[in-house]
Image: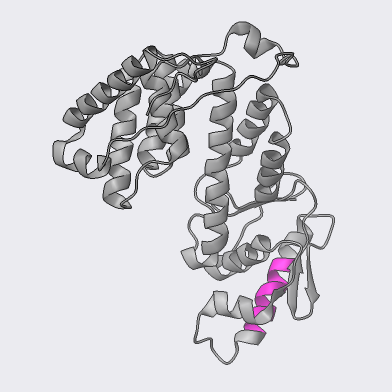
Amino acid sequence: MEYRILGPLEVLGDDGTPVALAGMRERTLLASLLLSANHVVSTDRLIDVLWGEEPPPSASNALQVYVSKLRRKLESASSTSPIRTQHPGYVLTTLPGELDAARFEELVRLSETTGPKEAVARLGEALSLWRGDVLAGLAPEVSLADSARLDELRLVAIERRVEAELSLGLHDELVAGLESLASKNPLREQLKGQLMIALYRCGRQADALAVYRRTRTTLAEELGIDPSKPLQDLELAILNQAPEISAPTVDTVEQPPAASTRSEVPLTFLFTDIEGSTALLRRLGEDVYAEVLAQHHSLIRSCLATLSFPRFSGRVG
C-alpha cells in the first residue's frame, strides 16, 4: 500500500492501482487515521472531526459504517488488513515506506549525518514527495497542527539542502530559487542569509546588502525587532569581503577536510554599534543610513590600522 498525504489525499493498492475514495467524510476519516498512523484514534475524536460540535444521535453507528466500508476497500487493495478496532477507537497500521509523510521525515533525519552530496540527494528525494499542501482539499481543521509541523519541517529541509548546495559551490544555480523562497517567507532569516551568500558569491555584493536592508526594515515593521546576530554578522562579513564567506574551492568541495594541525592562538574581536541605530534607520531611510553605516565601518577600520594584534578577525560592527 502507498498512502499520500503530502498533497491531495491518495491511496495506491499493492499493485499501484488508485483506491477510489467516496465522499468527503470517508476521505476525512482516512486522513484522520493516517495523521495518527500506528496509534489509536478515539471514537470521540473521529466523531468530532466528521460532524463537529453537534453530531447527530446516530453518529456512533454511522462512524462504524464508514469504518467498515473503508476497511473493506483497503483490504481489497492490500494483502493485509490495515484498519483494526482497538479501544477506545481505531488504528490504521502502516508499514515502513507506505506513508509519504513518514518517509519524508525519515529522509530528513538521515540527511543530518551525511556529507553534503548525499545530503543534497536525500533531501531532494524527501522534498520530491510533496505534491502540494498537506491533505489539500480537506477541511483545514482536519490537519491543522500536523500541517503546520510538516510545513515547518519542509522549510527546514529546503534550508538544509540549500546549505549543502552552497558548500558544494552551487551558488550560481541557487539565486533564482532563493529569491522566490525568500520573497514567500519574508521573516525567514535563514533563507535571507543564504540568498545573501549566494548573491555575494556571484559577485553581487550590492544586491546581497540590499537583501539585508530590506530584511531589517521588514523585521522592524512587522515585529519591531532587529535582525538576529548571525544575520548582522553576515552583513559585516559581506561589507568586509571576509574570506570565510567566499565560494569554496574545487579542492574544498571534492576533498574531505583534513585534520587541523595548527596550534591555537588568541583571536581579538571588537564589537561596535551606532547608538539608536533602529530609530536612525527609520528617520533617515535605508539609502542614507547605508552611507552612515559605511562611514562608521571606515572609521573603525582606520582606527584599527594604527593598532597591532597577533590576529584580528577582520570584522567590524
Q: Residue furthest front?
A: 307
Q: Main secondary structure of the magenta part?
A: helix
Above or below — where is 25 with respect to 112? Answer: below
Above or below — where is 56 with respect to 239? Answer: below
Frontmost residue, 238 versus 66 = 238
Q: Is residue 298 left or right of residue 16?
A: left
Scheme of image coloration:
one colour
**Residue 178: x percent and y percent?**
43, 29
Q: Is residue 185 magenta?
A: no
Q: Residue furthest bottom?
A: 57
**Residue 243: x percent and y percent?**
49, 14
Frontmost residue, 84 versus 125 = 125
Residue at the location (41% across, 32% down)? 271
Q: Is residue 70 magenta?
A: yes
Residue 241 visible in the picture: yes
Residue at the location (62% across, 76% down)? 46
**Residue 155: x percent and y percent?**
52, 42
Image quadrant holding the C terminus, namely top left
Q: Residue furthest right?
A: 79
**Residue 77: x percent and y percent?**
76, 55
Residue 7 visible in the picture: no
Q: Is residue 275 left or right of residue 50?
A: left
- Give the magenta-colored segment's residue range: 61-71
